[in-house]
Image (tube, coloured by chain):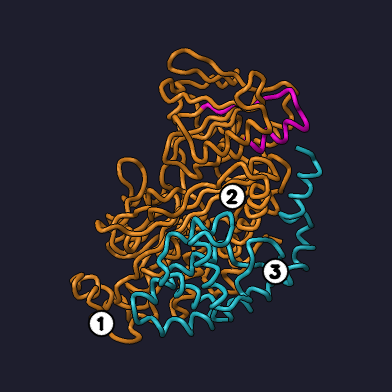
Amino acid sequence: MAACSRRRFLQFAAASPAALLSGCSLFPGKSCSKAHVVVVGGGFGGATAAKYLRLLAPELRVTLIEPKTSYITCPGSNWLFADLTDIRQLTVNYRALSSGYDIKLITDSVSRIDPAGRRLTLAGGQTLGYDRLVLSPGIDFHWNTLPGYDAATAEIYPHAWQAGPQTLLLQRQIQAMPDGGMVLISAPAEPYRCPPGPYERASMIACWLQQHKPRSKVMILDAKTGFSKQKLFEAGWAKYFGYGGGDSMLEWHSIADNPLIELDTATGTLYTDFGDKFQGQVLNIIPPQQAGRIARESGLTDTDGWCPVNAMDSSSRFEKHIHVIGDAARYAPIPKSAFAANSEAKACALAVVSLLKQQAPPDPQWLNACYSLITPEHGISVAGVYGLNAEQRVETVKGAGGLSRGNDEREERLEAGYALGVYRSLVVDSFGSAYST
Amino acid sequence: MKSRLARAAYRRLGGHSAAKLTRLNGYDHQPKYPRLLIKLLFAITAGVLPAWQTQADTTAQAIAFNCRNCHTTDGAATAPPTLDNLSAPRIRESLLAFKYDQKPATIMPRIAKGYSDTELAAVADLLGRH
């Protein structure tokens, strides 16, 4: 952080909210021009925040901290299981953001945040000051919620819920499975990243099995009693995979009242509370999730493991100068999706720039549109428009949003095309460019 | 489901090698295309930001940002369509038609219903500034 602005921001921090919201400019004009915003996490949320901060305020210094040099997107990664894409097409890098948008990229992870001093320390030892911090750390897993399932076991029974080697491992296991085998998918309770993800994944795996191992099955064991886009998925499954019939390729079972209590890692068997057992040749266990490590270690999470925010300006309920966006933050009823993270990042960027200019942030506007493929020719979607209610909490705008109409082949084909087009657009909008070449 | 369908979808998703995509999209390892885009966006926002006077303007800006999730083109001829060649009146007309179910579409009617006519008009004005 520039020395000149440090003292001013400390004064600014002490200013009353009333003065702030009245637009009263304590330090008029360009006092914030050298302000420094640090964005932590280079997923859809962090990348979008960094880019839009620079677009909104070209004078702002923006630093993006991300340990990986390239990023494999979770959106689109289920399509891998039906051979519709490959890891290379799902990989983006940060070159467009750093060179095209003049964002300072630091390839490192954050080991500690000092909110009082508005400084953070990187794993490499470097320290950075900030005026505002935007945290988009994504998810970590709650290991051992299912006894026997931890990070080491995930190398045998992949979660594939952070795209990359785990996704490829699951794909290899499905390809190596004998025909007649069983793929078990364990879907977690809400809230978790990408609510329709497990069901799109089951669809894509069934598509591939139908062509290559037609005597095989995929079965979802669900901790919930229902799921996102359920009617649309079930209609598609009935149409293509015999869902609901005696010999369905794809089965869905709610085990909400009969939860999994043990994984026998030696035999690949899942045991439930009532003593049911499910054995599969391939086990895809999607564990319960929580906000990424740095958010938890910085005291930004509630007891449920997620970060509560003041939705009006995306600031943490616990730390005024830290803004939290993406899957780690609690914006319910907005689902945890890449699309939503992008939308939250834009609202956050608008708020941060306003706050730096000592102006009231505009009313946030959030949008979610989420596509899933049931087959390569059958796409479905859910949309939601969100705003603030009178209590300053996130609310779904009534009369808008909702599901695809369904049962219309022309629209299903159109939406399959949109699924791919929107994916590409979202990547370009978030990362400044598509594909890591 | 037939494998030819899978191949058709794959072609839509990309289907070509990364190198070919690079050529199609008109940029290379040091992307020239994004730089142009950025200059354009800076120009657009530079034109828009001084107009941040009223709540309506800032609301329209906040809404319009979300259009870019789906309507940012990378040069590939895929749907959803680019907005870059559409005039403000044309966008306004479409948004209102989506909202009042006078123009059939898959998802836009669901989204347009989330906003007032005034908001849609203001968003169209922003998006129509090329």
Foreground mark, 2 or 1, reads 2
Residue A33 relative to residue A21: left or right? right
Residue type highlighted by circle 1: Ser
What's the residue at 52%, 81% (across, down)? B44
Residue A206 relative to residue B41: left or right? right
Give the percent coordinates (x, y) of residue A349. 42, 68
Label 1 Cα neighbours within 10 Å, binned few <14 / some 14-19 / many ≥20: some
Give the percent coordinates (x, y) of residue B13. 71, 54
Q: Which residues are magenta?
A: A203-221
Whether callout 3 and callout 1 share a subunit is answered no
Q: Nearer the viewer, residue B61 or B14?
A: B61
Q: CA distance from mark 3 to mark 1?
A: 43 Å
Foreground mark, 3 or 2, reads 3
Q: Quadrant of the N terminus of chain A?
A: bottom left
Q: Is residue A127 magenta?
A: no
Q: What chain is tagged by disc 1?
A: A
Residue under label 2, please give it.
Answer: A75
- Give the mark nearer the N terminus: 2 vs 1: 1
What's the residue at 54%, 62% (across, down)? B102
What's the residue at 46%, 70% (across, down)? B120
Residue type highlighted by circle 3: Gly
Residue under label 1, please give it.
Answer: A25
Which secondary structure lies at badge 2?
A: loop
Residue under label 3, please give it.
Answer: B75
Which secondary structure lies at badge 3?
A: loop
**Which tint is chain A?**
orange
Q: Quadrant of the C terminus of chain A?
A: bottom right
